[in-house]
Image: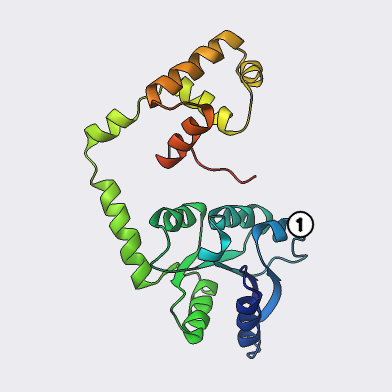
Amino acid sequence: MTVGVVDESQLFRECVAAALEEEAAYCVTFQASSLEALQQEPPAVSPDVLLAACGSLKGNTAELIRWAAREMPGTKVLVLGSEEEQESEILDCIEAGASGLISRGQSLEDLKKSLAALASGETLCSPRLAQSVFSRLKELAGRRPQEAEEEAVLTARELEILELVADGLSNKEIAKKLIISLHTVKNHVHNILEKLEVSGRYAAVTYAYDRRWLRRRWQ
């Protein structure tokens, strides 16, 4: 089985690689400190499994998973996390397509078992992290319908424009893309800011991301 390791700690990467390669069943084909490092020097051959540490990637783990899905199709991503991680980051990893989520507190033997399970087609989530994930999902599912309705205050057109704002387009570029007048775009942006009670475009985009109206995209 070929494995890639992504973690900002060189010591962690080298220790994991050395431990795995003590057995003939594993071959660590590359190590990287971050998503940016992978983008600058992508591996020549995609590994069977990409091992990524959630806490060390500074919130970019989900972006790494999406990048891997696009650039290394067929590679499964196993995320190392902990109970201290933000629940939103863990959920983002699952939504992005992580094949497994295990605790940093597990042993090397547990890691090897997890890699073998992934290779056989299983999807993994360690009990401790599963408890955190399911607690969050239960909380989201338990929200009253009227609360969700009260929060969804933007029209479909306003959401479309807000998504383009999130992509970095100016009012003029949005008007050209949607084939509407600049004045109309400005009115929509003004209405968005008023409805969300925020002071600027960046704040509106952040508000939408926090409520998952928009999905973050790989850059």
Up-down relation of residue 176 to residue 208 (above or below): above
Quadrant, the C terminus? top right
Total marks shown come to: 1
Give the camera-side residue of 200 and 14: 200
Give the camera-side residue of 94 and 73: 94
- Dot 1: few (<14), some (14–19), or many (≥20) neighbours within 10 Å? few
Q: What residue type is labelled 1?
A: Gln
User: In the shown orientation, is residue 114 left or right of residue 126?
Assistant: right
Residue 6, x across and y down, in percent? 63, 68
Tag 1 residue: 40
User: In the shown orientation, is residue 116 left or right of residue 39?
Assistant: left
User: In the shown orientation, is residue 177 left or right of residue 209?
Assistant: right
x 43%, y 78%: residue: 105
Q: Quadrant of residue 87?
A: bottom left
Q: Quadrant of residue 85?
A: bottom left
Assign a secondary structure to mark 1: helix
Residue 130, x across and y down, in percent? 35, 66
Up-down relation of residue 102 to residue 190 (above or below): below
Q: Residue furthest front?
A: 199
x 57%, y 55%: residue: 60
